[in-house]
Amino acid sequence: MLPESNTAQRSEDIRVLLANNCPLILAGIRAIVLTNTDVIIMGEVADGTEAQRLSQELVPDVLLLDLEMPGPSPLEIVTHLRQQCPAIKIMALTDGNDEAAIREVVAAGVAGCLLETEPPEIVVQALRSVAQGGVWFSQAVMEILAHPPAQAQLPHLTEDELAVLGLVVVGKTDRQIGWELGLSERTVRYRLQNIYDKLGVSTRIEAAVKAVRLGLA
């Protein structure tokens, strides 16, 4: 969706793409933008697939990315865009409840992370800072990052699963993992699915990042 700008675009304007599937939050952000003529909404998307596509098509200054949308995970989106469109600054938007997702996108290179409850002036200040090459993290997010996850929260993986995960982290394919561990590709895929389930992820990239973050590999 491509809304009309609230003003004629100027070179100093901050061009923002909104990726959020909550109408209430979108309405709030629009209201903030209407009172700040240097912030221009280039478009709005409600799922991860469209966030990737429209980001590459429009190349906004800032992608304001919700961490709870359907489609590709925030980690996948951030990783993909950091590789394909490094000029785009990514600002995560969160309710603060999914600490694992916050840690993952920060590790993947987002320029900032805001709580959905931030006052309008903070949202605008954060967008301006990130667009100019700075970083901006809410105080609550900083507190989350300052305290690593407790060991008791680590998922229990078997020795066989840890062996597979370790090879995933270093970039091995299913065939290469099978060759190194003496397993069929079918068995490797079965163990990978168990790993995904235990880690709460759905892709190799997510599994590798989470393994490193949790000290599992």
Image (cartoon, rainbow, N blue to C red):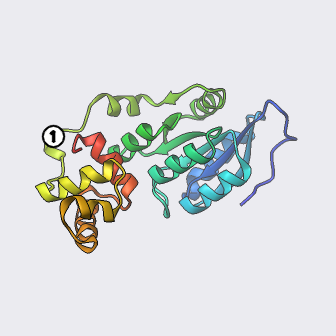
Horizontally, residue 204 falls left or right of residue 181, namely right
Instruction: Point out residue 21 in the picture as x, y percentages from the top left corner.
Output: 55, 59
The amino acid type found where label 1 is placed reads: Gln
Instruction: Point out residue 203 in the picture as x, y percentages from the top left corner.
Output: 38, 60
The C terminus lies in which quarter of the figure? top left
Q: Residue at x 25, y 64 (%)?
A: 178
Q: Residue at x 58, y 30 (%)?
A: 126
Q: Residue at x 50, y 64 (%)?
A: 71
Between 196 and 45, the residue placed more toward the observer is 196
Vertical position of residue 140 compared to residue 178: above or below: above
Vertical position of residue 109 compared to residue 142: above or below: below
Between 14 and 108, the residue placed more toward the observer is 108
- How many labels were placed on the picture? 1
Instruction: Point out residue 32 in the picture as x, y percentages from the top left corner.
Output: 67, 40
Residue assigned mark 1 = 151
Whether residue 197 appears in this view of the structure is: no
Picture quarter containing residue 35? top right
For the residue carrying disc 1, how many other residues have a C-alpha within 10 Å: few (<14), some (14-19), or many (20+)?
Answer: few
Between 95 and 18, the residue placed more toward the observer is 18
